[in-house]
Image (cartoon, helix red, strand yellow):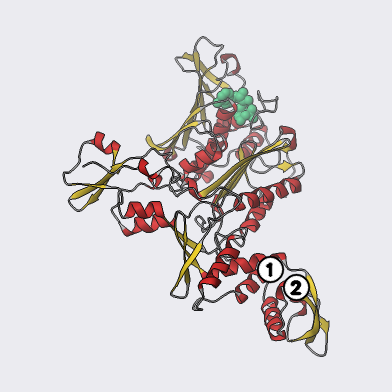
Amino acid sequence: MSKIQPLNPERIAQMAAGEVIDSLGAALRELLENALDAQATRIQVEIWPSRWQVRVADNGQGIPGSELEQVARRHTTSKLDGCSLGFRGEALHSLARLGSLTIQTRHADDAHGWLAAYNRQGELAHQQPAATALGTVVTVADLFADWPLRRRGVPPIAPLLTLVQNAALAHPWVSWQVHREGQLLLSLWPGTSLQDLLLQVLPQLDLSDLRYQRIQEGDSDWEVVLGLPDRLHRPRPDWIRLAVNGRFVQMPDWQRVIQSVFQHALPRHRHPLVVVHLRLPPEQVDWNRHPAKSELYLRDPEIRQEQLRQHLHALLQSGSGQASRRSVHLIRASKAKSIYRVSSLQSPALPAAGCSLPPLKALAQLHRIYILAEHPQGLWLVEQHLAHERVRYEYIQQHWQPVELETPVMLEGLSSQAMEQLGLELEPFGPNTYLVRRVPLALWSEDPKEIQGSLRELSRCADLESAQVAVACRGALRNGIPLTLEQMQQLLEAWQRTANPHTCPHGRPVYLALAEKDLARYFRRRWGICDRPISDSKLESFWELDPLGDRFAAQVRRSSSASASEPRDETRSAPL
Ligand code: ADP
Ligand code: MG
């Protein structure tokens, strides 16, 4: 081995820069954070992946001409007051080291703007006056020109878009535009909440698919949006996203909390949509865990996780009083070329929160599988096995306390370890044989065979929750069993009292709603028929039109705030 020698300072600086900026995305991330810290309300991003170039233009505070000399030097920052996304004073310096950095900017105190270019040491190479609007345009071109190993292929656009989406979700008052190679790719309008922006970022979502709440609790401020588990779930956990004080972060513990809340509301191997933004006083957050600030240390992480769990549970159970939109999709699917717009098909607002589902009246059993039920705003089909499974699951969860059996039950060939994991005590009784004297109340039955069956089922489960799901399923009413009207009514009522009636414990939806309003629309009740083709776009903005062969069905468009609670005669038929 050769002698130990000190590294040359240039090399050290370059290695440090490479740690902060390891991709084109990292460059974009730093530029976005600077723009947001400068209080921008309009941010334009231009990306040229083929040139390894990004440019971020903002309408923020701008940089005073006198400070341009300093900004790209190592460890210089103007953010020591602590109310920004956090500072390291390294980003611009690293960008200068790894690419070619230019800044065009104007600060309100300056009479005109400036254009500045930097060399690889982060020193100001050139500065000249330039006509510039208030704000800053930072361009990084030719990133990693000297680091061929970092340039494997053209950088993909998707992670860059995710960065912008996340920044937008956490700063909903900002408007955004993203261009790639000169073409507009994404444009987002300002809103007032995380939810407003989520609906723009995922335009296929409908407001009624989501639950949103903003909760102020002591010194913390939570924004939580979740997708209702019977309507939205994803094959990957890509939409479990968490932000703290304006920045999205990786927090595996929190991800686990979220997954556990949804565990028995979603089908197997599916993941929920949950976006959370927690705002805390800056002294409770330490960003110096990772150079990209993608991880953090938080004061009292367990307390915050518990708060998150409670907020999610509360939201999941809150105001489930909206009919499922599935009826709409059903109707839409039945008419491929429909001009119905989803936004014009609002589900009826059902009775206020408190009672989570509308009063249902059992009408008939269909195919010995579905209960057809009527309520004031429509018809529902309720799947009997799934509804009963949900009822049993919640009952079992609430009745897991042990009770003494009059005659102990004998079990053979079971793993005592598995049983003990579920909190059941087994008493050895001969080779490979055990006695059970106490069982959870939910498993109690007069028939010892029944208890044995349940215990056998349990011994195959990995944990308590899946054991409870298995017991719920095992005892639930099968499909194919005939029911009387009275039995159906009882089941409907028990099911309506459950905390989470939307899905069964495996995550399958329990009911399908057909809203009367959508039926009226489907059968075009209160619509007029028009023989002439209508081409006038003014007319179209006033009439809702629907092609019917060579004719049109038409009705007066209603304002978007219209709801089912309005008097019927508001919908006039078209005088055509
Ligand atoms: P940090 O953000 O950690 O302070 P940077 O190297 O990212 O470090 O930026 C250095 C300084 O340059 C910032 O503290 C800020 O004063 C200034 N600056 C950078 N980008 C902008 C911008 N878009 N608008 C206004 N000032 C900026
Ligand atoms: Mg910065």
Residue 218 horizontal/vertical position (percent): 73, 36
Q: Can residue 63 be seen in this view?
A: yes
> What number of labels is visible?
2
| Amino acid type, callout 2 | Pro
Q: In which quarter of the image is ligand 2?
A: top right
Proximity of marks 1 and 2: CB atoms separated by less than 8 Å: yes
Q: Does the residue labelled 1 lie within 8 Å of ligand 2?
A: no
The answer to whether residue 228 is above or below residue 480 is: above
Which residue is at the front of the view, 39 or 316? 316
| Amino acid type, callout 1 | Ile
Query: Disc 2 marks which residue?
Result: 440
Residue 82 horizontal/vertical position (percent): 70, 28
The image quadrant of residue 72 is top right
The answer to whether residue 478 is above or below residue 503 is: below
Image mark for residue 396: 1
Q: Quadrant of the C terminus?
A: top left
Which residue is at the front of the view, 44 or 331? 331
Mark 1: give few (<14), some (14-19) or many (20+) Cα within 10 Å: some
Which residue is at the front of the view, 378 or 191? 378
Q: Name the residue located 49 percent from the left edge and 11 percent from the top edge.
A: 112
Which residue is at the front of the view, 514 or 474? 514
Residue 151 horizontal/vertical position (percent): 50, 44
**Residue found at the very far bottom of the displayed protein:** 430
